[in-house]
Amino acid sequence: MSLYEKIVRREEKISLIGLGYVGMPIAVAFAQKADVVGFDNNAAKIELYKSGIDPTNEVGNAVIAATTVHFTCDETELRKAKFHIVAVPTPVNDDHTPDLGPVESASQIVGRNLTRGSIVVYESTVYPGVTEEVCVPILERESGMKCGVDFKVGYSPERINPGDKVHRLETITKIVSGMDAETLDTVAKVYELVVDAGVHRAESIKVAEAAKVIENSQRDINIAFMNELSIIFNKMGIDTKAVLTAAGTKWNFLKFVPGLVGGHCIGVDPYYLTYRAEQLGYHSQVILAGRRINDDMGRYVAENVVKKIIAADTPVKHARVAILGFTFKENCPDTRNTKVIDIYRELQEYGITPVVADPAADAAKAKRLYGIDFVDTAEVKDMDAVVLAVAHEQFKGLTVTDFNRFYHPARTKVLVDVKSMLDKTAFEQAGYVYWRL
């Protein structure tokens, strides 16, 4: 009987290593079809899951409370599983080189608890070659077993979009790969249990790794182009949104928009690809140029906040500026690698006192990562300027009257709309100094 058949019959288990925004939804989905061990070395997170609380807001508390996933921080529980899925983050270091620490650590944990006949599938975004050249040696060393003989490996890049309730694991075609035909077939069949959109069988692990890393690189480059256009049109005194709306009437115009590019995917993945290219003697031109533009957009926004404060005849030093939204994207509590922090820190460089309100963010994590204490949106008062940084649902219904309450009554109101959420004309007619990307 094959491993796939044993999983379906619940004679063998699936394990998820890493229960964050990616791993947890995968674990929950598979638990509807198979027995699942959900492992994370964060004991506090495991306790939340056991209590029926979803700190990621990806599936919701009710789903977590009802799931049959066996949540644990005891790595020895992984020995009960034969199909392991590694879904840990792959960040970059301060010098933009890949930080493979989390995936290496996960490989050590899996290796220590690996049993013969197992398949290990990596979902973490990496550059081509990491699974076979970095992870497999660790698995072999820790387990004392031989890859291809005692266990097999595969790669199936995650495509989950945090905060997106439409494009989910079940509805996105899943790329799958394996070290040989037999492994590929097993990996494909296992994922087909939960992916309604079906799977694409890549011809090799390296092809699957490369496909994933270019998906976000492509988006990064397109957004960088929009950001550069925004900078150019700003100098020309032309509204970028109006230009894009006009250009968007052509059937083949790609509808990207300018903005901050943060998070642990789009702003990170291109560096994995260019790092590997550098190792092979090729210096990226287009990809890194896009990265430089996008990495600088927080500073650019802050500079324009200052310019508009000056235009409003308000003293810059000690000015009070509220930043609405801090997460790396809308309707998601994740603050990791948010570029809003660049706005915050750049404003501080000008002697400005910024305050942050974000009803959707994980405030405790933001405090640990950045040392910032959020304020309640209702506490935002007597401001000289407001930066609407993230398009949370909680902010979409705000009117001119609502914004009026945020400002010092004796000052000209400065409003910077990073996401172009608001009606520009309405705010300008209300006497605001309004600016957007």
Image (cartoon, rainbow, N blue to C red):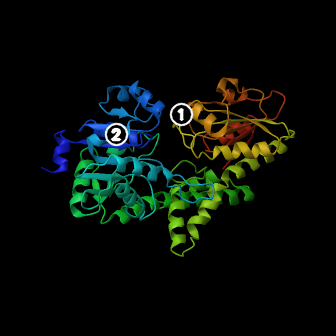
Residue 375 image offset from top left, x and y in percent: 67, 27
Instruction: Assign a secondary structure to mark 1.
Output: helix
Residue to which mark 2 is pinned: 76
Residue found farthest to the bottom: 281
Among the two numbered marks 1 and 2 on one chain, the one whose residue lies closer to the N terminus: 2
Instruction: Assign a secondary structure to mark 2.
Output: helix
The reply to whether residue 249 is visible in this rendering is: no
Q: Residue at x 51, y 37 (%)?
A: 332
Q: Residue at x 76, y 50 (%)?
A: 303
Amino acid at dot 2: Thr
The CA distance from mark 1 to mark 2 is 42 Å
User: Is residue 333 or residue 330 the one in the foreground?
Assistant: 333
Residue 125 image offset from top left, x and y in percent: 44, 55
**CB-based contact (under 8 Å), mark 1 and mark 2:** no
Q: Quadrant of residue 183?
A: bottom left
Residue 228 lies, with reference to residue 27, above or below; the image says below
Q: Residue at x 38, y 60 (%)?
A: 137
Q: Residue at x 84, y 28 (%)?
A: 410
Q: Is residue 282 left or right of residue 382?
A: left
User: Is residue 87 or residue 264 the one in the foreground?
Assistant: 87
User: Is residue 175 or residue 433 the one in the foreground?
Assistant: 175
Q: Is residue 388 left or right of residue 191?
A: right
Residue to which mark 1 is pinned: 393
The reply to whether residue 351 is visible in this rendering is: yes
